[in-house]
Amino acid sequence: MSELRGLVKAYALKNAVKHGGKAKPESVLAMILGDHPHLRPHARQILELAREVAAEVNSMSQEEQKEALLREFPELAEEEKKREERRALQPLPKAEEGKVVLRFAPNPDFYIHLGNARPAILCDEYAKAYKGRMILRFEDTDPRTKTPIKEAYEAIREDLRWLGVVWHEEYVQSMRLEAYYSVAREMLRRGCAYIDLCKEEGKRMLAQGSYCPTRDKEPEWQLEHFDKMVEGHYREGEALLRIKTDPRHPNPSMRDWAAMRIIDTEKHPHPIVGSKYFVWPLYNFSVSVDDALMGVTHVIRGREHEVNTEKQLYVYKCMGWRPPVFIHTGRLKLEGFILSKSKIRELLSRRGSEFLGPDDPRFGTIASLRRRGILPETIRELILNVGIRENDATISWVNLAAANRALLDKRADRIMATLEPREVVYEGNCVDAEIPYHPDFPARKRRYKLCGGDRIFLNEGDLRLGEFRLMGAANVKVEGNKVVLVSRELEYALRKKLPVIQWVPAEGAVNVRVYVPQGLELRRLEGVAEMALREYGQDARLQLVRFGFVRVERAGESYELIFTHE
Ligand code: GLU
């Protein structure tokens, strides 16, 4: 079986096993190119092969397909099995197939980070598992303190798409203010809410277990004053809509919590609706109205929202709505990385800040992890492993890197480069070097001809090894500024246990700069890579032999790479 055909068959079997016994040639092609981008130029040939192979595979029974996958491609089958095991999330309480509605509700005041991605991925996973609906809702009703930023909406969408999160509906809260006004009016009518005109004093009174006297006014008065709020009769801080709970509630924050307030949008215009509205809902109010009106059946969010859930239940009760199932998860941190929006913002705003933006590879935002070269599958895998547990979890960089390495190892091509280049001259007969890009696919290789007098770059430190094998080429000995051919045979190298080292033909060598994130530092290493690097464009993920994995940040005359991990 030719190598390419073998590869196509492996993917076709995998595709068939996953999709009820039917492999689709187009999906097979997409999977192959996704995992092996360097094969793109051969797309047409692969598609043809995929058609042929799919026909063959689809004529087998599902059992036969599984057996063949297991027999011929045990690693792929193993990978698939592990993935399925991981997918075995604990069941969602009171969930019915086809009826589950979940939502992810980010604040578009910044980029999302690994911790925010947790509810997004869990909801996505459950929505898929239960064939339910997933909603993306931008919670942008605080133009004053959590000021939404325009670019964040699209940045969040992009991160979610990259993470493989699928949503069926999308809402922007700032465009739904009328819906909140209408529920507010209904709650005033029903006597479950009131307009507090006592300003600061109202807050003080509640802290002492009493309340603003307007609480006792009849609904007509309340509605009239709510309309006045909406029409702009009051300034910031002069009027508040409060939900009646219990002015003596043991938890002072629960006492008649504030549901709507006035924001001077002339001074603080909203990026989407400008200065159109003065009355803005607070989180607890808009979130309960939306979850109810959008038919959300399960809310998955951080444990820090537990008290909020209790607050929100007052809205459900007053309106006679059935509350969703609330699931509170612990926090997720990434050891050694900054996740906090405010901290990242502060670092970015420092004068002369060296940080490259919210997606700087030193941060823990999703965009940062992507830029660093982490795969979306890795993030999903780690988050699903933690699941909906209530306790906080910290993912260590070591674990994240290990999970990522396991996936990258199979797909990243290997390129020779040196970051401490020292030029030497090769002495000896011509040798033809044939070096596979990836050990799993030995037929795919680049060729170099190395002849006496040719200049090559080696790692400065490797010269001290004295004798070694130039990868894919020949065994050589160091003599001053030269490396001299000893023999060509691999057996010789194996027998003498010679180290196999990477080398870079000086002709066509590409200048590279590698950024290595380390805590808050970003080290820059300069060096050269073999010509083959030019086959890869921005975003390609590669392994630099004896150095580690990198992502191509910029491809051009010279290359910029970001170090992912070893
Ligand atoms: N916008 C809220 C947040 O990002 C949503 C919390 C929730 O899921 O209710 O914290």
Image (spheres, helix red, strand yellow):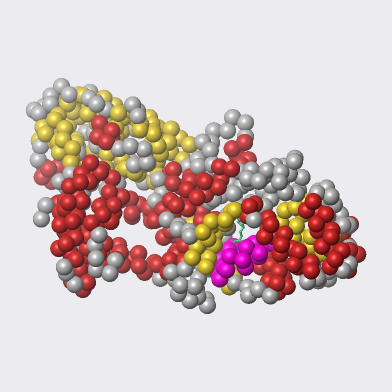
- Residue 62 coordinates in the image, percent (x, y): 22, 72
**Which residue appears farthest toward the right when viewing the image?**
213
Q: Is residue 361 left or right of residue 561?
A: right
Magenta segment, which residues? 284-305
Percent across and percent down for residue 112 are 54, 50
Q: Nearer the viewer, residue 509 or 66?
A: 66
Give the image quarter of residue 252. Answer: bottom right
- Judged left or right of residue 139, residue 208 is right
Q: In this rendering, is residue 278 above or below 432?
A: below
Q: Residue furthest top?
A: 453
- The answer to which image quadrant residue 324 occupies is bottom right
Look at 71% across and 69% down and name the residue there: 315
Regarding residue 515, the answer to whether it shows in the image is yes
Q: Is residue 379 left or right of residue 456?
A: right
Q: How many marks?
A: 0
Residue nearer the viewer, 156 or 488: 156
Q: Give coordinates of residue 228: x percent, y percent.
A: 83, 54
x and y percent of residue 450 in the render? 14, 29
Magenta span includes 103:
no
- For the residue pair 78 and 119, the one nearer the viewer reads as 119
* Depicted 225 relative to depicted 190: above or below: above
Quadrant of picture, ligand 1: bottom right
Residue 456 vs residue 270, the one in the foreground: 270
Q: State yes or no: residue 299 in magenta.
A: yes
Identity of the residue drawn at 15% across and 46% down: 443
Residue 75 visible from this viewpoint: no
Q: Residue at x 45, y 74 (%)?
A: 97
Residue occupying image coordinates x 78% and y 71%: 190
Give the quarter of the figure containing the N terminus.
bottom left
